[in-house]
Image: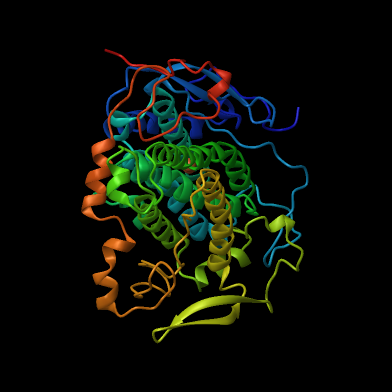
Amino acid sequence: MPDGTIVDYDGLIPNNVGLNADARLRKALETWHPGYIDWWKGSGPVGFQDSLVYLRTAVGVDTEGWARFGFVKMPDYRWGILLAPAVADRRIGFGVHQGEPAWQEVPGEYRAMLRRLLVIQGDTEPASVEQQRHLGATAPSLYDLRNLFQVNVEEGRHLWAMVYLLQKYFGRDGREEAEDLLRRRSGDPDAPRMLGAFNEATPDWLSFFLFTFFTDRDGKMQLAALAQSGFDPLSRTCRFMLTEEAHHMFVGDSGIQRIVQRTCEAMRAAGIDDPADSGRVRALGVIDLPTLQRKMNLHFSLTLDLFGNEISTNAANAYNAGLKGRYREDKIEDDHRLLDATYQALRWRDGTMVTEPAPALSALNLRLRDDYVAECEHGVARWNKGIAAHGYGFRLTLPHVGFNRRIGDFAGAPIAPDGTVLSPAAWQARRDGFLPSAEDGAYVASLMRLVAEPGHYAGWIAPPRAEIDNKPGDFEYVRIAG
Ligand SMILES: [Fe+2]
Ligand SMILES: [Fe+2]
């Protein structure tokens, strides 16, 4: 049997990393486990902890049938440590160590850099669970409630994945970092999560769908870059995490599609020709498309900040070291060293936008962000197809990358969503046309209520095209405990 294909489900911690043979690591993880459960119960989903939820659990790591569905109470979910199978004779694919055998242990010279990468990635996983903890109370259906919890338990598992790497390879430092990952809280002024977007509120289901579409997709890009890592345990960990991440983005993508569909159907039925007539559309109890656009503007711009500075020495160092590659590094045809290469960079200089070549190594954050934006464009095009299919000319668009930024070149630049450069005063005056207003938030909040009858859906969202695990449309995905 190749390494890592057998998953041990008998112990406290399901794993395919040979935990039984590693007493020191097992002890560290078992010591951490009660604190994790406390965190889950205290900062994870509010309510529903005693409800039976129809969840998929990873039971293998091969591409065929890696998951099993069944009813489980969330605190009893089998959070395991699962690595994608080892690739025989894997080599480092880029940077100054290109061609050398992939590392199975942490190279001493890169220890601090690697630890930092793991902690930053690890911190986002519990953060999103915290951000989404109140959403169960207003789920538009049991189907959606189940999807929320599926995303939540898998983000919990992603925390386990990073904690495994910290505890196995970083000794006492790693154990301290693992504790700190349970100590910080999203939005807590004293101990916030490390990245800005993960301290924002996710107040309603429209935000949740946009978060899973935009922000989980940033997670995917980061994981894909780390999956290229020359540190083989990190690569294998991330490759398996990516299989779960696909579902999170599906939840967001299909959630917005269903909202668009419902809104368009309602507008047609009411004889509304102008989707921008928000007053009439809202009277129908659906989400008007301009509100969706403003929420998109917010979530997209917050997520772009997660890519960091466009021009970054840290990114260049991580690449040179062979720790973090480009998106689909192994599919790119070039020298994978980038010493003399350049990359076209959109910069903000003295109040104007300029496009100029930057050293490709320094521009790696920007390149990953560009790859991300291209993927987002595909999703938005699908949503627009749905609008067009109902005969409306309204188009959703991604805002300009310089809009509403707090990090990088464009931080604070007064750029409109369409890319127009405004005066700071003009930008402020038009703010409520660019970003969700308090009134938008109140309207969306007014729609949010729990629909708990199997097969029923809130009036602002269409049912899904297909059920989970081929269940019938009236399947009771969550058996809510009384
Ligand atoms: Fe995740
Ligand atoms: Fe995710």
| Left or right of 211, for residue 97 | right
Question: Could you say where residue 296 lies in the image, as x and y percent from the top left?
Answer: 40, 54
Residue 306: image location, x then y, percent:
43, 59
- The colour scheme of the drawn protein is rainbow
Looking at the rendered image, the quarter that the C terminus falls into is: top left
Left or right: 364 in relation to 402: right
- Seen from this angle, which residue lies furthest top? 482
User: Height in image: 65 above or below 382?
Assistant: above
Image location of residue 324, percent across then percent down: 59, 58
- Residue sitting at 70 percent across and 69 percent down? 337
Work out which quarter of the rendered image holds the N terminus and state it.
top right
Furthest residue to the front?
Answer: 271
426, 285: nearer the viewer: 285
Residue 323 vs residue 29, the one in the foreground: 323
Report the label total.
0
Q: Residue furthest bottom?
A: 350
Residue 336 position, x and y percent, is 71, 66
Q: Is residue 319 above or below residue 233?
A: below
> Could you tell me if residue 107 is visible in this image?
yes
Residue at (28%, 68%) from the top-left corner? 430
Taking depth in this image into account, of 104 and 272 the one nearest to the observer is 272
- At horizontal 49% and vertical 71% (from top left) the residue drawn is 310
| Residue 274 located left or right of residue 83 | left
Say whether residue 172 is visible.
Answer: no
**Quadrant location of residue 86?**
top right
Name the one closer to the observer, 274 or 331. 274
